[in-house]
Amino acid sequence: MAPSLEKTIYIGAFVHSKSLQDLEICQKGAIGVGENGTIAFVERNVINPEALREREGWESAKTVRVGENGFFFPGFIDTHIHASQYPNAGIFGKSTLLDWLNTYTFPLESSLSSLTRAKQVYTRVVSRTLSHGTTTAAYYATVHVDSTNLLADICLSKGQRAFVGRVCMNTLSPDYYRDASVADGIRDSQACIDYIQRIDPSAELVAPIITPRFAPSCSAECLRALGALHRETGVRCQTHISENKPEIALVKELFPDSKSYADVYDAAGLLTPKMILAHAVHLTAEEVALIKARGAKISHCPASNTALTSGCAKVRELIENGITVGLGTDVSGGFSPSVLEMARQAIWVSRFVAMNDGDQAKLSTEEVLYLATRGGAKVVGLEDKVGGFEVGMDWDAQMIGLGAVPESGESNLEADDPVDIFGWESWDDRVAKWVYNGSDKSTVAVWVKGRLVHQTSRYER
């Protein structure tokens, strides 16, 4: 694991969600992070930052200051991303979901049986997501044990907090890319669970996650066996649900005795508080009630749902029904590995819904930032550790740096951040401009549990 860290005081503006609607913007703040990577103190309205060194034990603490137009923000949490599909990001053609799987996805995933190729892909996707401020990711890998374990190794070495899942599927996929039998699938899933728990026994950063691809790719016997594995191990689960209408019709055909798509998972013992359900675009009222009753969580993947014309999830209704929701990039159905981009897309999708259902369906800037951080933390069961800036929480954070426009209006646009700050904007305006215009160029540095895991040339220690 990572060596002991220096005590560090992070000085400057910080922004985080206090609740779904309440975004705290502290313009003159200071956050002290101890040698264990957790937050020791949070100060607001700091007049003299140097006086913080008078605290006992903090006399020799290192300081990190954010720029004038910048701020510290919690790390993003991607609750649904296919690491194995990253090379296909942006490649979805004219496909709908089921065609896209056969045309693009299965051939790519099957090629990652090569550890050389898997290392190339997984190293890049972990580095890329970190550069976008993603400090935690729930990853789908492939059916291959060795390359799935390699993904866990890479996440651990690069310091990204991650849930890594070996994909299980024994039907409705090409003969060249599926589990040979239910027994083989369970054996291989257990092997990945054992390996990941061995390399990070306390799950400080990396943990396994049971991953049935989705109901159409798994027989009822396979789902029941995975449900039993879930009960026996207590390991979290992730899968897909109700992404588009042809898929739902297929589930009804394949599982005629089930009351609904959600009931398929419930009957298998998989619909529990530790289950992450991606998409949930076309849930019935009965399914919403069942998911709420079981405590399962939902990953909203707006870019993917639009790209594959799956539909517009009604996130406001899910939230109002008491269901926990986070954001997922769903690379490569989604075109971008950026959770900030998903926050934008979530706003747009909610406005598409509002065109038919009324303005109450709209999500605000404050709400999507909550979904990207605290909401995501609840989805993956880490709400007591990450997602905000409170004493005792881990320092999973990103330094955001926004560009200052000089009086002349002229500057090196290639070197500048894409967010132009003219100086007269309120802090609410600055945050909004970042949400709508920011990119990985806005992310100056990233920390996970106090460890610096990404920095750009704009970061000054």
Image (cartoon, helix red, strand yellow):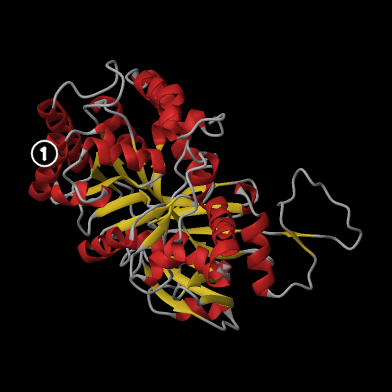
Q: Which residue lies furthest to the right in this view?
A: 408
Determine the residue positioned at 13% across, 29% down.
182
Query: In the picture, which quadrant includes the C terminus?
Result: bottom right
In the drawing, does residue 149 fall left or right of residue 309?
Answer: left
- Where residue 96 sits in the image (x, y, percent)? 48, 34
Query: Crowding near pointer 1: few (<14 within 10 Å), some, many (20+)?
Result: some
Q: Which of 283 and 349 is in front in this view?
A: 283
- Vertical placement of residue 399 versus 24, above or below: above
Determine the residue positioned at 37% across, 52% down.
280
Q: Nearer the viewer, residue 319 or 46?
A: 319
- Where residue 28 sits in the image (x, y, percent)? 59, 78
Residue 387 appears anywhere in the view: no
Tag count: 1
- Vertical placement of residue 289 versus 81, above or below: below
Residue 442 appears anywhere in the view: yes
In the drawing, does residue 203 fall left or right of residue 300?
Answer: left
Residue type at the position of mark 1: Ala
Determine the residue positioned at 39% across, 53% down.
299
- Where residue 162 sits in the image (x, y, percent)? 34, 46
Q: What residue does disc 1 label?
A: 225
In the drawing, does residue 446 fall left or right of residue 255?
Answer: right
In the drawing, does residue 22 fall left or right of residue 113?
Answer: right
- Vertical placement of residue 337 versus 33, above or below: above
- Vertical placement of residue 138 versus 274, above or below: above
- Where residue 297 sits in the image (x, y, percent)? 31, 58
- Callout 1: helix, strand or loop? helix
